[in-house]
Amino acid sequence: MPVGMTLTKFLHEEQMRHPDSSGNFTSLFSDLVIAAKIISREVRKAGLGGIIGAAGTKNVHGEEVQKLDELANEMFVRTMEHGGHLAAMASEEMDNIIHVDGRYPKGKYVLLFDPLDGSSNIDVNISVGTIFSILRVEDGRNVTEKDFLKPGMEQVCAGYILYGSSTMLVYTTGHGVHGFTLDPSVGEFFLSHEDIKIPERGKIFSINEGNSRHWLPGTVQYMDKIKSNGKEMTARYVGSLVADFHRNLLKGGIFLYPADRKSTRGKLRLLYEANPLAFIVEQAGGAASTGEGRIMEVVPGELHQRTPLIIGSRADVEEAVSFCKAPTA
């Protein structure tokens, strides 16, 4: 499809390729895009609107909630709940699943989302983002938490919205990865990156080296190797997962948040962060691993389960995993 096509037209063309489609997914995605536009607007004016800084509460993970976290979460719920396409939602910021209000019809999808990843960076004007994942459920029945506890392979759609120098939406439905950039003057996303492919091997590594004192031997050995071999590797770490992942997706490289002595089960959330990004990177030709196995094959045991994450260019990920799996003396 031609670069410059509107997202609305792109979704319509995709729907036409599936004659049996009811249009429910297209309508659901359109509602999601509206939420993204609202959050993008609020992020742009955050410094003037008194919505920068901490809200004075902690979320289910014990992390300090930012004012924009609360706003983004509310915008997603309010925008998505009445469309008739969702049976329920789950947010990284909330303890339990969010049932669709009884006043509204229920659909055959559930939505999982991290409303504002990297929000602690907003007061210093660093890029933040929204990550989302969509699963299908049986129509016409009450949804429970169990319906959300599915491996990443069962996702029907995953994506993220990056709020940076421009606002960009990147998503996949299992048929490649496509990126759209928001033109705020007309309020529409336009196709800017068609069929994104990550390089087989990259020159960038992204890891929080402030945690190096907690690293396991495999991580230490891998980092020593990539810093000492003949190939030039560049360190790039923003501390905003969406921003780090997006750069590496386009340029090639590897992002690591491995298990360590401090976070033995990993730090990132499986359902809200790792699974959707793993779906995207695999569709772009890359790989995502826990360090022991494929992220997309992990069967979740709880809604807010954490996981190690090694993600990016396939050859780089495979090399890193080989060090994680290697026996230590």
Image: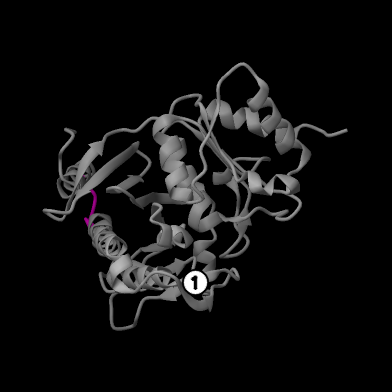
**Is the magenta region chiefly helix, strand or loop?**
loop
The answer to whether residue 12 is visible is yes
Q: Single out the residue that lies furthest toward the top.
A: 230
Residue located at (57% from left, 68% from top): 63
Local SS, label 1 = strand
Residue extent of the magenta highlight: 19-23
**Quadrant in the picture for the N terminus:** top left
In depth, the one of 11 and 212 nearer the eye is 212
| Residue named by callout 1 | 65
Residue located at (39% from left, 69% from top): 52
x and y percent of residue 142 in the render? 43, 74
Q: Single out the residue that lies furthest toward the bottom.
A: 103
Is 22 a magenta residue? yes
In depth, the one of 193 and 110 nearer the eye is 193
Q: Single out the residue that lies furthest toward the right.
A: 329
x and y percent of residue 96 in the render? 52, 74
